[in-house]
Image: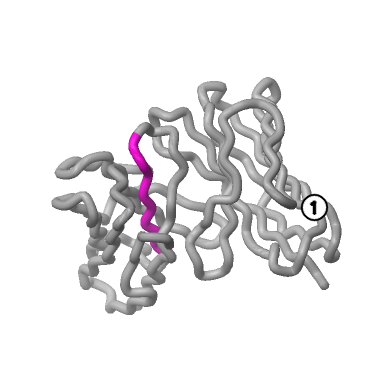
């Protein structure tokens, strides 16, 4: 983690409910990312934000929403429209410049039943 | 063709062996190359970062980039059971989000 806090570590929800995953950082990084990780699928990009009040869809944005009202925070909402929400969700940050490596939080495991 | 290809393994080696992990990529615009290590139920942690062809060494780890062949490698010398993890390569051009390989699962047996 090293300055990136994802909470909670485990989250359980009933099908049909929206749920919000928290990601907070104190690294003063401009860019923040949300990835989803499933067994055998690698990391898939959901949304990213390079500056406050702006964000872009990644490869699998359908059924998810985000906001970036503060530099330190980039919450992800998993809506009831997401067909297969059970997964491991990872938040990452990146310093400015676009060529910097990503720094990851320790993830939130979401289980929807 | 996927942008980044990585053999998922699993790869099992005895303690002390030299491990070679590899990725190939298709986009010649990629300039920045990284290797991450991910332990079970944890976030990936950065192991190596390089932007040029050639070798970069850090302790028991060596990252190798061959831009002409679009091929990158991570070598682990004197592998230890604590090296057992999933290793992800990651590449980007600087203008677009990082592209990850699917990860190779490594087990080092004592």
Residue sitting at 18 percent across and 44 percent down? Answer: A52
Residue sitting at 70 percent across and 63 percent down? Answer: B83
The residue closer to the viewer here, B6 or B56, is B56
Q: Position of residue B49 (x, y in %)?
A: 57, 40
Q: In which quarter of the view is residue B3 placed?
A: top right
The residue closer to the viewer here, A82 or B3, is B3
Q: Is residue A88 visible?
A: no
- Is A26 colored magenta in this rendering? no
Residue range of the region highlighted in magenta in the rendering: A89-96
Determine whether A2 is above or below A48 in the image: below
Placement of the N terminus of chain B among the 4 image quadrants: top right
The residue closer to the viewer here, B24 or B85, is B85
Determine whether B9 is above or below B30 in the image: below
Return the residue at label 1: B77
Residue sitting at 71 percent across and 33 percent down? Answer: B55
Q: Chain of mark 1?
A: B
Q: Number of numbered discs present?
A: 1
Residue sitting at 29 percent across and 61 percent down? Answer: A23
């Amino acid at each position: 983690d090293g300055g990136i806090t994802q909470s909670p570590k485990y989250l359980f929800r009933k099908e049909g409910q929206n749920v919000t995953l928290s990601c907070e950082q104190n690294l003063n990084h401009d860019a923040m990312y949300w990835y989803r990780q499933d067994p055998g699928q690698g990391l898939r990009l959901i949304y990213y934000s390079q500056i406050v009040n702006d964000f872009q869809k990644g490869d699998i944005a359908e059924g998810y929403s985000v906001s970036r009202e503060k530099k330190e925070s980039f919450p992800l909402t998993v809506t009831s429209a997401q067909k297969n929400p059970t997964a491991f969700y990872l938040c990452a940050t990146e310093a400015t410049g676009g060529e910097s490596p990503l720094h990851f939080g320790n993830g939130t495991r979401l289980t929807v039943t | 063709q996927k942008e980044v290809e990585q053999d998922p393994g699993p790869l099992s080696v005895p303690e002390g062996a030299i491990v070679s992990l590899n990725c190939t990529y298709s986009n010649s615009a990629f300039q920045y190359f990284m290797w991450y290590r991910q332990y079970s139920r944890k976030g990936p942690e950065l192991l190596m970062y390089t932007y040029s062809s050639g070798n970069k060494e850090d302790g028991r780890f060596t990252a190798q980039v061959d831009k002409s062949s679009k091929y990158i490698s991570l070598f682990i010398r004197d592998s230890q059971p604590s090296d057992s993890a999933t290793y992800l390569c990651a590449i980007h051009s600087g203008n677009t989000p990082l592209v990850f390989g699917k990860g190779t699962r490594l087990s080092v047996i004592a």
